[in-house]
Image (cartoon, rainbow, N blue to C red):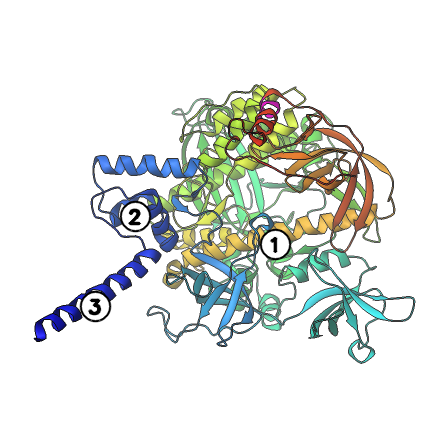
Amino acid sequence: MREPNERSNRQQKRAAKADRGDSQSASRPVIVQGAVPPRDVLLQFIADNPDKGSKREIAKAFGLKGDTRIELKDLLHSLEEDGLLTKNRKSLSRPGALPPVTVLDITTRDKDGELIGRPTEWPEDLGAAPAVLIRQSNDSRGKGKAPAAGLNDRILAKIFPNKDRSGPAYTARVIKVIDKRRGAALGVVQRLADGEMRLLPTERRGEEMVIEPEDIGDAKDGDLVESEVVRNGRFGLPRARVLNIVGSVGSEKAISMIAIYSHGIPHIFPNEVMEEAQAAKPASMSKREDWRDVPLLTIDPADAKDHDDAVYAEPDTSPDNPGGVIVTVAIADVSWYVRTGKPLDREAQKRGNSVYFPDRVVPMLPERISNDLCSLREGEDRPALAVRMVFSKEGRKAGHTFHRIMMKSAAKLSYQQAQAAINGETDDKTGPLLEPVLKPLWDAYRIMTIGRDRRQPLELDMPERKIMLKPDGTVDRVIVPERLDAHRLIEEMMIQANVCAAETLEKKKQSLIYRIHDGPSLAKQETLREFLNTLGISMARGGQMRSNSFNGILSQAQGTPHQIMVNEMVLRSQSQAVYSPDNIGHFGLNLMKYAHFTSPIRRYADLIVHRALVGSLGLGEGGITPGEEAQLEDIAAEISTFERRAMAAERDTVNRLVAHHLSTKIGEEFQGRVSGVTKAGLFVALPTYGADGFVPVSTIGDDYYIYDEAHQALTGERSGLGYQIGDTVDVKLKAAVPLAGALQFEMLSEGKKLPGGARSFHKSARRDKSGGRPKKPGTRPFRGGRR
């Protein structure tokens, strides 16, 4: 009589187990060994295992061998082309997924009191940044006690997807607390006509707040302040309390200070760092070669304050290398002064790099180090690491050697000064240097150019603009500095020195941080290909494109009205260069081995490479330590993030300066160029000022507009007229918000008939609306409002 009940119990247990299995399988892919997984299983595996996103790791996880690995490769390419996967170096991930190591800001707590963070840098077009649950632990994988993090801290964290699908999308383990930050918002105090004080936000998404008299402290109208929210009720504006006065928004350098604070860039050196810098003594001759008689010279911008590289060239007299040259590049020996784990080193790693604004520099190292002891000053003894490179007359590198030296710069020249001398316009300083030093440098450069032309790096023509300021810190004008052979000479010699550093350390089997640049993803290639088709420019298919393939595209556009547009779209198709201890080469430079070596005064990555060279070559004190080697992955991820932080802060400052400058020109008309197209409207760049403004789609004419992402265009549904990236247009300035760096324009130019590809898409979209053939993948209509 018990058998049916037992059978029933067993059936219930099996059902419960099946239910649990179904629940688990709903959140985790079932791995079938030896078979290529279905698309959804593969995508789920990559989402759940961001640290196993390489083709090799995926094949290993599914037990794939032989022909099945080829099937996997084809499937991954297909998913890339469909935009379901993105490639970063050798690893694949879902679009919008956080990388395995990420910098987070801890912003709040959940209902259980757990800390919640969000990525410090997150593209606006991806929507809200994902929430990350911070896991606090007493043990960090055998590395001792994990660093304690708290609310408003900025941390470097190891990221893990939340596989049970409850709560935030990710969890994180704290690797390092980067900065202890208060929950402060930045804003500008404004007094209204009735005497009420308001706090105006400096961020585009910020909210205006009220400041009560008891919360304002010593702040005055126009002061840039840090504040905290003291009341945020259901109705009315939030209330703020002033915590700290940063300065007056009308004062010199106030604009860059906004970016410094809003991006959390460390800009004040702690006392212990300054004390160590002041106590530093000139380097000794221990294990150094005396090269003070070699006429090395520095060639830099005219306003440069630190000089970390010097160059010299001479003919190679060896009978084995007829017509060859020897090029010497000497780099400031920062590793002698900045030792691993010391206050100077900890602060330099915390900053990652120097940050350059139009009105100031936030240096990685104190001036005592960067502008004095390490700067290769004219006529003064300075320690350096030098690489001596031998090139054949065909521009091929025949060999190189590294040396730790003491040097004395023969001269400090500007780019313009050196170029003028070569062009026959010498001065008192360059006259005596022309024959013995400058001409051999240019002879060597011509030989190195042969090798560069054979290598064919990516040759984008994107002129860099420089903002010139008045004494009061406001914009005077925007210029495009002339690109001289003197610039190219220094650039090529630095690139070759960087190659030598990577080659030497690889040969010594020494761990290092590479500068890597992955090729464009298949999805980005396809987007570029479709765009180029609208201009009648062909682009080959295939996942193994090289930099010279893109040079062919650029040459087809050269001299046409589309030249600037094509250069911009090729640039957008490229991946971002980053630092990594794992080498995949540098796509843009077309180099297999590349490491930053030439700027240790302003980049922490170069300092790591210097230490690695000193240690592996036995060049004396200041070499890399085993502990530092073990942390290279985390250091590389951290300084890559800090580099992006610096770029964002520099861009924001330029936008604010230009918006401040143009705020007095509301209602004036300008000629610009469409620099970006989104479903919400057009970004229009003003070449004269080097800044962008926005034209909302709802304000563009009396038409409905269709957004074509592939062709970067907005097209009127009825008129068939539209705007495409690169178009020259006339606009009127409608509004300027200096604090946020925002400009809004009104479009004055009529749309135009677009090239065949975009126009044919427009027609197909209309047919789809009335039941015709389906829209082209990757495009979608967007209805703007009527005016």
Image position of 638 with respect to 138: above or below:
above
Q: Along the horizontal axis of the image, is 444 left or right of 499?
A: right
The residue under the point 74% across, 42% down is 693
Which type of secondary structure does the marked residue at label 1 adopt?
loop
Which type of secondary structure does the marked residue at label 3 adopt?
helix
Point out the stretch of residues depicted in magenta: 757-761
Contact? badges 2 and 1 (CB < 8 Å): no
Q: Quadrant of residue 5?
A: bottom left
Q: Along the horizontal axis of the image, is 673 left or right of 287?
A: right
Q: Quadrant of residue 625?
A: bottom left
Give the label, 2 or 1, closer to the camera. Answer: 2
Q: Amino acid at mark 3?
A: Gln
Binning the other alpha carbons within 10 Å of mark 2 as few (below 14), some (14 to 19) or many (20 upward) gives some
| Residue 85 drawn in magenta | no
Q: Is residue 415 visible?
A: yes
Q: Which residue is mark 1?
A: 354
How many numbered discs, if any?
3
Q: Which mark is residue 12?
A: 3
- Of the pair 283 and 64, the residue shown nearer to us: 64
In the rendered structure, which disc, 1 or 3, sits on the residue that comes first in sequence? 3
User: Residue 515 appears at what percent x and percent y?
Assistant: 47, 45
Q: Amino acid at mark 1?
A: Ser
